[in-house]
Image: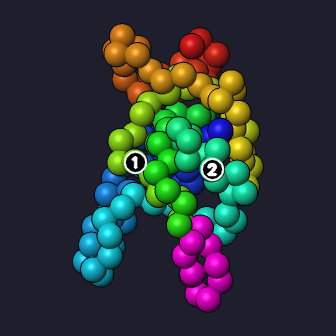
Amino acid sequence: MHLIKLCVGADSIEDLAHWQKQRAAERRKKGGKVEVMHVTRMTPKRGDELLAGGSLYWVIKGQIAVRQKLVALKPVVCEGVPHCALVLDKKLVPTMRRTHRAFQGWRYLDPDDAPRDLKASDKSIPDELRAQLTELGLL
């Protein structure tokens, strides 16, 4: 089982990587762990299934573009309210792009519906061009 989430504010996979590095650096300065994580309000009920090889698929600019392996789910408290930290592997794995409509929060993503990872031969097209070609329906 996987999760899918909108990556609001990022225009590319590189933007997401830069944002995650900045957040990790901020946590390091405060004496915290240097984990890549995304904090969400709701805790997934199917945590065991997610942690058995699941990933978080990021939707960037209306397209599923990249995934990160889920490493752990940790309870955290933000402003007195319980939340869940999705601890992610640092490696961003580009996927075959696929258009996806906007939604709030996160959703479960069935493994059969998840886009496949890009092969080395697929990476010859720059990411920005790949996004444009996908949007035009040419990929």
> Which residue is pictured at 41% across the width and 28% down the height?
127
Residue 95 in the magenta stretch? The answer is no
Q: Amino acid at mark 1?
A: Asp
Q: Which residues are magenta?
A: 75-84
Q: Position of residue 4 (x, y in %)?
A: 64, 44
- x, y (%) of residue 86? 53, 58
Residue under the image location 35 percent in, 42 percent down:
91
- Camera-nearest residue between 4 and 12: 4
Q: Which quadrant: the C terminus?
A: top right
* Residue at 57% in and 81% down: 77
Q: Quadrant of residue 110?
A: top right
Report the side of 102 relative to 78 (left or right).
right
**Amino acid carrying mark 2 in the image:** Asp
- The answer to whether residue 26 shows anywhere in this view is no
Of labels 2 and 1, the one closer to you: 2
- Residue to which mark 2 is pinned: 48
Mark 1 Cα shell of 10 Å, populated few (<14), some (14-19), many (≥20) = some
Helix, strand or loop at mark 2: helix
| Image location of residue 52, percent across then percent down | 56, 41
Between 120 and 18, the one nearer to me in the picture: 120
| Colouring | rainbow
Q: Which residue is mark 1?
A: 89
**31 up-or-down from 52: above or below:** below
